[in-house]
Amino acid sequence: MTSPPTIDAARFLDRLRALAGVGRDAQGRLTRLAASDADRAGRDAVAGWMREAGLEVRVDRIGNLLGLWRPEGAQGDPVMIGSHIDTVVDAGTYDGCVGVLAGLAVVEALREAGGRPAHPLAVAAFTNEEGVRYAPDMLGSLVYAGGLAAEAALATVGVDGTVLGEELSRIGYAGPHAPGFLRPRAYVELHVEQGPVLEREGTAIGAVAAVQGISWQEVTIEGAANHAGTTPMALRRDAGVAAARVVTWLRARARAGNGRSVATVGRLRLEPEAINVIPARAVFTVDLRDPDAGRLAALEADLAERLDQVARAEDVAVTVRRLARFDPVAFDPGLVRAIEAAATRRGLSVRRMISGAGHDAQMMARLCPAAMIFVPSAGGISHSPHEHTSEAELVAGATVLLDVVRRLSGPPEEPAE
Ligand code: GLV
Ligand code: MN
Ligand code: MN
């Protein structure tokens, strides 16, 4: 290196603010669902910044956006840095975007310092990480890692009845490259923690050693519509009541485990949805998570049993559709140690942790050594417009990312740890 590389904090944070402005509605709420018009606008901005940074922009068949830097003399597979820019509904501005834009900042820092990395570098923005519009979540990185065929993924029907492949074509991001066309030698992702641990402890950096398991299901309960005024309580087949029993049971079951289980019903729809009609149908989603594979499986088995009981007790029919299922994932121990060492060298406090949220890194771990860097989330809040991480914390995270990537991509005298 001719000069030590440093993150251009102003440029990184300016872009983060600019991206945060893409996809706001008239009320100012940010929603940039995968393969939507807002996503196209966000992708256009990121692709533009990638080109400005001198990267070759590539899009694969599932819409993953990749920026590649092949410095002169660099050889072999690239070191990949990535995350996503799709969001949940009424989202915050850090989830995913921080990882993509920090990746770009890292590559620019290395380029502008005049370095000659031994290996190429790639920055990735994966399609549909959030899974709000199309299930499963982490879909783009799952396909990239070979866990789901591109054809099947492209045929996915969204909650709004759209087909992912058609929407990607419509927004101009159905690319020609086969997912996985760049096989990374290592993958590193910076992300906001989205939980309370780092802030509570006053720790600057999380070295993420694992991601907990995730199970998503859609439950449909069929009862019978009838008159709300004339139908005696004993004669009802009320799908709404049956759904409510499952919702409250889920909370009690997750709490009773006395472990790390969490359970959420985030979507619930009743039909025909009228004040004086007994609900004929209830459709709701169940999000179950646990860091332990056995406990997650037990939670799923107990839910199945409970659904049977409720079906009998309420005289309703229950069907279940699986939307996503991922076991817990352990990251590469050497890479986790490299993150800890990089933080310590920068004088930043660091702790190992398990991610409660799902991330593209857990899919990329199927392909290559992968790990994640977390920075604190104020109040542990995420998937909310109140999501916040300070500028100093973001730059600290990006700096650790830079150091880790520099060592991974460095000349032979700077081997990866
Ligand atoms: C992704 O954000 C998730 O639901 O964990
Ligand atoms: Mn995310
Ligand atoms: Mn998210």
Image (cartoon, grey):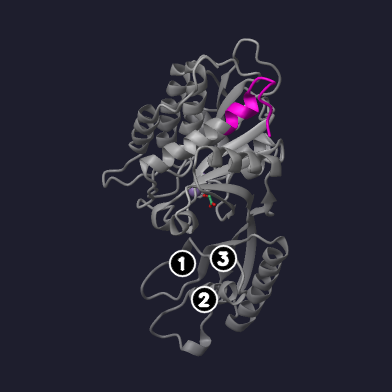
- SS state under label 1: strand
Residue at (41% x, 56% y) in the render = 381
Q: Residue furthest top?
A: 72
Amino acid under disc 3: Val
For the residue pair 299 and 192, the one nearer the viewer reads as 192
Where in the figure is residue 383, as x and y percent of width and height?
43, 52
Q: Residues within 10 Å of mark 2 (few under 14, many from 20)?
A: few
- SS state under label 2: helix
Mark 1 and mark 2 in contact? Answer it, CB < 8 Å. Answer: no
Q: Which residue is mark 1?
A: 270
Q: Which residue is mark 2?
A: 248
Amino acid under disc 1: Leu
Give the distance between the C-alpha atoms of the residues marked 3 and 2, in whole angstroms.
13 Å
The verdict on residue 381 being magenta is no
Quarter-wise, where is residue 276 in the image? bottom left
Quarter-wise, where is residue 32 in the image? top left
Q: Which residue is mark 3?
A: 262
Dot 3 or dot 1: first in sequence order is 3
> Does residue 385 appear in this view?
yes
The verdict on residue 408 being magenta is yes
Mark 3 and mark 1 in contact? Answer it, CB < 8 Å. Answer: no
Where in the figure is residue 83, as x and y percent of width and height?
54, 38
Dot 1 or dot 2: first in sequence order is 2
- SS state under label 3: strand
Dot 3 or dot 2: first in sequence order is 2
Where in the figure is residue 212, as x and y percent of width and height?
63, 56
Quadrant for the C terminus, please: top right
User: What span is in magenta?
Assistant: 404-417
Amino acid under disc 2: Thr
Give the distance between the C-alpha atoms of the residues marked 1 and 2, in whole angstroms.
17 Å
